[in-house]
Amino acid sequence: MKHMSMVILSLSFAGWYLLVWLPTSSAGEQLLLEERFDSLLPGEFGRAVLAHRHTELADGKGTEDSKAVRVNYLGFERGSRRVVVTSPLTAAEEATLSFAVKFCPEFDFARGGKLHGLGSARPVAGGNPVTDDRWSARLMWRREGGLMTYVYHQDMRGRYGDTKSAGSFRFTPGQYHRIDMTVRLNTLPDLADGEITVQVDGKPVIRHQALRFRSTAASEGLIRSIMFNTFHGGSSPEWAPRTAEGDFKQDCAYFDDFVVRQTVALP
Ligand SMILES: [Ca+2]
């Protein structure tokens, strides 16, 4: 009834009410991105992901037998071939990235590999230097299907990002898991009060606190990118997926239901 009255209100006043209300899914939440790969015309993010040489649209392989994107992981001497697509988002200080992932049966997790995340306007990764507006918050699968955060932030200890593990959680190949990762930026440039929380299948598995993602109030340091990043590695042969005989092999996974919600409005 409440929803109905909102629509009637929108229709009886000027058009800008529609613009205000339609993207709002509930109080304080705004949809920044949605890509389920089922539409004939994917959005900018979906098009960029599907244009990658190691991805393809997969009929009937998504959640509830819908369409999904399939990633092919080609083993080589540095892990598996990189599938890295970064796409812009409307700026946010707090946002939740949700997606569904199904690793193919017999998936070789090897030592680990990257999973998607959020970043600043120009997210930093791959051991490159963090600057005041550059950071990234991704996930990684680990040996035997474990999960951890992989975060580039202002106070990280080494050249590579800091991590926090999801304890005893393990991905089950052949089964869809839903991941929700919320990034809340530090509120002031010199305050380490940023946070990442991760839920899998609705259960909290990681809380990563006291993070200083950015050391500037500049807009470039806000949550501005979705990072579709997935590959085995690391960058040495031990990270590569292999057959039982020890040869490099091709693995696969399906991804579906990408949603990014801004969970707290910018002031
Ligand atoms: Ca789908």
Image: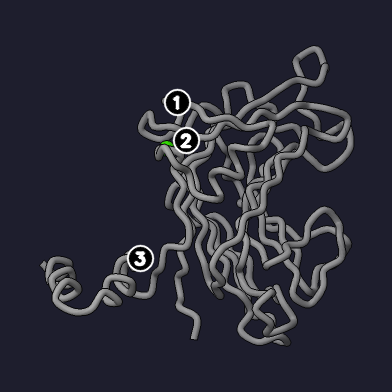
In this rendering, position of residue 119 left or right of residue 1: right
Q: Mark 3 sits on what residue?
A: 23
Q: CA distance from mark 1 to mark 2?
A: 15 Å
Q: Residue at x 41, y 68 (%)?
A: 30
**Label 2 packing within 10 angstroms: few (<14), some (14-19), many (20+):** many
In this rendering, position of residue 133 left or right of residue 185: right
Q: Residue at x 48, y 34 (%)?
A: 68
**Residue type at the position of mark 3:** Pro
Q: Disc 1 on helix, strand or loop?
A: loop
Q: Mark 2 sits on what residue?
A: 176
Q: Disc 2 on helix, strand or loop?
A: loop
Upstream in sequence: badge 1 or badge 3: 3
Protein image colouring: one colour
Q: Residue at x 49, y 42 (%)?
A: 100
Q: Mark 1 sits on what residue?
A: 59
Upstream in sequence: badge 2 or badge 3: 3
- Rendered location of residue 134, percent (x, y): 75, 69
Upstream in sequence: badge 1 or badge 2: 1
Q: Of 68 and 40, which appears nearest the observer?
A: 40
Q: Nearer the viewer, mark 1 or mark 2?
A: 1
Q: CA distance from mark 1 to mark 3?
A: 28 Å
**Residue type at the position of mark 2:** Tyr
Q: Is residue 232 above or below residue 257?
A: above
Q: Is residue 42 above or below residue 253?
A: below
- Rendered location of residue 194, percent (x, y): 63, 75
